[in-house]
Image (cartoon, rainbow, N blue to C red):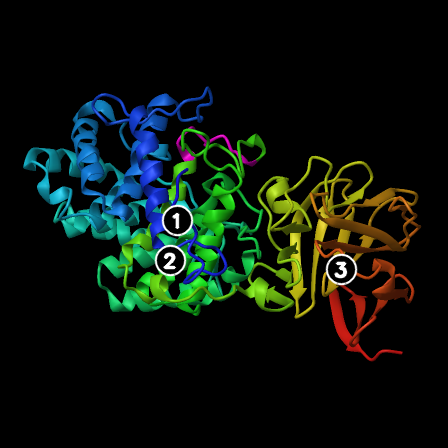
Amino acid sequence: MQLPPEDRGPSPRTGYTRAHWEAAADALLAAVEPYATEDRALYHFPGTRQSWSGRLSDGLEGYARTLLLAAFRRDETALQRYADGLAAGVSGVWPRIEDRGQPLVEAASVAVALRLTRPLLWDRLDDAVRQRAAAWLTDALTAEPWPCNWELFPVTVGGFLAEVGHETAAAHQAIDRGLARIEDWYVGDGWYTDGDGRKFDYYNGWAMHLYPVLHAWLADDPALLDRYGGRLERHLADYARLFGGDGAPMHQGRSLTYRFATTAPLWLGALTGRTPLAPGETRRLASGALRYFLDRGAVDDQDLLTLGWHGPDPAVLQGYSGPASPYWASKGFLGLLLPPDHEVWTATEAPGPSERADATTPVAPANWLLQSTRADGIVRLHNHGSEDVRYDPYYTRLGYSTVTGPSPSYDNSVIVGDDPGRTGIEPLGVGEDWAASRHTAGSGARVTSAVLVRGAVEVRAFLVTGAAAGTSVRVTGWAAGDGLRCELLPAVGLDAALTGVTGEGDTLFVALSRLTGAADAEPLGETVAVRANGERELTVLWSRGPGLRVRWQGSEVVVEAVAQV
């Protein structure tokens, strides 16, 4: 992808300015055009993979998601091509919007794009085309969504249809119904679960916040914007800490092939004035993420987005991932709605949280502990509260980071018996430098886990109950990566291979762990001393600063500070 030369004056950390974002958008739009059908209603990208929705739906996905990019870019020439495709699509080419069908998702992208570019696209269409397009979109108002972020797609379509005066009563009903539904999943402090359970991931930013806040802003509804914008603002205080010093977002959750869609909530906060971040910090985080992926092969030699994380990578895909799925990355170009003279574009880049100081950040709703180190820019996420309904390596591991991905060998796990399963996660609390949870292991035993952190060092403790005496236990650490030190040492109940066996009753296992990119880090074994006081109490003394005492007290984990000895 050809981009302008770096400009380190306004952008000392990334070299990217608005011109780089515009050039990236233009290159992506130009690259997809050869894959449009003759009538421009569908975009069929190369490759043999199809989603489980089939080729026709995948072609609509290609149209809708790249239309969204053209809308953010406000490219009138491109929008005219998409206007032609819309006219053909609603004349019988596109599949109908039906219950729990992928076209419902794509209808939301079409509706957002039409709403954002109304004078440039919608208002220039023939009335007959507008009527057919509105009729096609109307099915989204009553189609049954999956009970998750999909509830917001009828809201998004309803917002547009109400604005243009089509089926306004039904549109407002859909809006009210969807917004009421997500209240069931709001857990406070700016965080939602993506449906029932404890599914915390980037859908918070690129769906659960994006659609309600954008709707409230476009509808010019102060009450709605106060509610949803206030939640976004609180969310961004945590969210900004999920980006590493190299620009990488946290490698956790599903749909990771959307890549720099992770920047959408950053731009949304600036667009609506609902952000705790300084303008230069917003641009630094967003541009850092865009550059991170472009520098690492996210687009191929034809400037097409690939199915993967850096380059192609089937490990991050789901059954719904089709050839055009990566183009939800278009949401990352939301910042182009801000005028060139907006302070987010004119301010000098400011360092992000992971670049300013070592930090630990408890995220209470998700029961996560974020641990970042300035020297290497690495952010680690200690997961003691997020899981999917099944074992999923992108939800269920004990730890994630901005420099590693889940490995097939079950990194960051405690394996009781021969089954690495971790289900039924029960959060037990999170503090400034600790987090704790309980889960059911694959063997059926219960494991109560606690992690305590200082700098880049972690103490991982596991109390195993309900396992037969002599059951094997194995603890794993971080997956290896280029330029990284991934260390794991036994401390209590484990041998040099990080394995042990359970006793007749409760059995405590403790390991020291470290993921670092710092070449001069002191030996891990000299950073902390660990002492078990029986099976239900642990004292941790750091080489610097106050220590901690952990007590497994009934069904609770109690962590308290202790003075150094």
Q: How many neighbours does mark 1 have within 10 angstroms: few (below 14), some (14-19), or many (20 or more)?
A: many
Residue that numbered label 2 is attached to: 267
User: SS of the residue at dot 3?
Assistant: strand
- 528 versus 33 height, above or below: below
Report the Cα–Cα distance between label 3 and label 2. 33 Å
Residue that numbered label 1 is attached to: 332
Q: State which quarter of the image contains the C terminus.
A: bottom right
Is the C-beta separation of discs 1 and 3 under 8 Å?
A: no
Is residue 186 visible in this depiction of the protein? Answer: no
Residue 149 lies left or right of residue 158; in this view the side is: right
Residue that numbered label 3 is attached to: 458
Report the Cα–Cα distance between label 2 and label 1. 8 Å
Of the image marks 2 and 1, the number of the one nearer the N terminus: 2
The tally of labels here is 3
- 558 versus 303 height, above or below: below
Residue 411 lies left or right of residue 364; in this view the side is: right
Camera-nearest residue between 450 and 350: 350
Is residue 5 visible in this depiction of the protein? Answer: yes
Residue type marked 3: Glu
> Residue at coordinates 28% horizontally, 39% vertically from top-left?
67
Is the C-beta separation of discs 3 and 2 under 8 Å?
A: no
Report the Cα–Cα distance between label 1 and label 3. 33 Å
- 218 versus 233 height, above or below: above
Q: In this picture, which residue range is highlighted in magenta?
A: 316-325
Q: How many neighbours does mark 3 have within 10 angstroms: few (below 14), some (14-19), or many (20 or more)?
A: many
Of the image marks 3 and 2, the number of the one nearer the N terminus: 2
User: SS of the residue at dot 2?
Assistant: helix
Give coordinates of residue 204: x percent, y percent. 46, 53
Residue 415 marker: none
